[in-house]
Image (cartoon, rainbow, N blue to C red):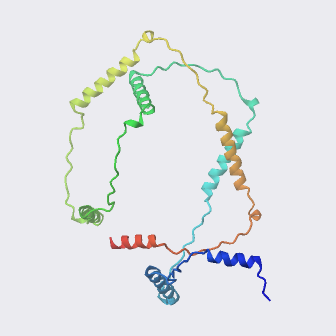
């Protein structure tokens, strides 16, 4: 009797005849020489740490410092807080009416010229075109001082030591010679000019001044600045009144990160230099 073959098996046999031949490429699972050298250095470092003799360590005294502020800082902060509370809670009904006296203080010609120069400089900065800039290549230089700078610094240190360790007993006595303390002719002429300049200012005729209109500006801060300062105060109060009991315990996971091949090559290159 002939055995019946399932149609699914016939499909699998036909599919096998349609497969192409593929060569298997074997890869070496062994680590590279750099990885072996890196692992060797890590093992030597670990063995050096584990076999380190604690008796070779020197005794070191720990100096404890108080991180808390001193009494003066606390008193200053307390006074500032009282001043702020006094300003915020000050009743406006206690304010008195005051009449504002407007005074016309005209700027001098030097101040006007200086302000014009500042306006021109600001205008040139705001209207400056970046397309006029030229491309510049940055040249990196060694920030380490050269031999001449080191020798100069060494001489300066020796000179300072000679001054601090100088023996005053080696100084010889000298006689002080008094000279005429009167000012020279140049100083007298300069002082005379200043006196004449002051007299011209005091005797200046105000009727020669031209009329100008004074523009009053509100010195109060804008509402955005007031709102920002209010938010900062609330943020400070929230930090000061924060309860440590509300904090949750968190465990820190320490992960050891081995350096990459690029870091090792960079470190070797820096060591060769």
Residue 70 coordinates in the image, percent (x, y): 61, 59
Of all residues, the one furthest to the front in this rendering is: 1
In the image, residue 136 sits, relative to residue 18, either above or below, namely above
In the image, residue 96 sits, relative to residue 178, either above or below, namely above
Residue 156 coordinates in the image, percent (x, y): 27, 61
Of all residues, the one furthest to the top in this rendering is: 207
x 37%, y 39%: residue: 133
In the image, residue 7 sits, relative to residue 144, either above or below, namely below
Given residues 7 and 136, the one toward you in this image is 7
Given residues 212 and 231, the one toward you in this image is 231
Residue 63 coordinates in the image, percent (x, y): 54, 73
| 10 relative to 151 in the view: left or right | right
| 55 relative to 239 in the view: left or right | left
| Res 119 → quadrant | top left
Given residues 19 and 128, the one toward you in this image is 19
x 41%, y 11%: residue: 205
């Amino acid at each position: 009797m002939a055995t019946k073959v399932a149609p699914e098996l016939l499909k699998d046999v036909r599919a096998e005849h349609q497969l192409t031949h593929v060569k298997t490429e074997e890869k070496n699972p062994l680590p590279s020489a750099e990885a072996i050298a890196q692992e060797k250095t890590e093992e030597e470092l670990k063995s050096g740490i584990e076999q380190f003799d604690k008796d070779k360590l020197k005794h070191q005294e720990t100096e404890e410092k108080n991180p808390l502020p001193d009494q003066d800082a606390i008193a200053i902060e307390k006074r500032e807080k009282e001043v702020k509370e006094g300003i915020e809670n000050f009743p406006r009904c206690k304010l008195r009416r005051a009449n504002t006296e407007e005074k016309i203080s005209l700027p001098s010609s030097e101040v006007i010229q200086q302000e014009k120069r500042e306006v021109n400089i600001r205008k040139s900065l705001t209207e400056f075109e970046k397309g006029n800039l030229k491309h510049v290549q940055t040249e990196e230089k060694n920030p380490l001082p050269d031999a001449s700078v080191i020798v100069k610094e060494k001489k300066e240190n020796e000179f300072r030591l000679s001054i601090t360790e100088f023996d005053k007993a080696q100084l010889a006595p000298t006689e002080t010679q008094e000279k005429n303390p009167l000012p020279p002719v140049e100083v007298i002429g300069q002082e005379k000019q200043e006196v004449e300049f002051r007299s011209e200012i005091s005797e200046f005729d105000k009727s020669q001044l031209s009329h100008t209109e004074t523009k009053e500006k509100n010195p109060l801060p804008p509402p955005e600045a007031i709102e920002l300062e209010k938010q900062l105060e609330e943020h400070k109060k929230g930090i000061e009144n924060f309860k440590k009991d509300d904090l949750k315990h968190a465990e820190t996971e320490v992960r050891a990160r081995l350096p990459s091949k690029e870091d090792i090559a960079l470190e070797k290159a820096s060591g060769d230099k």
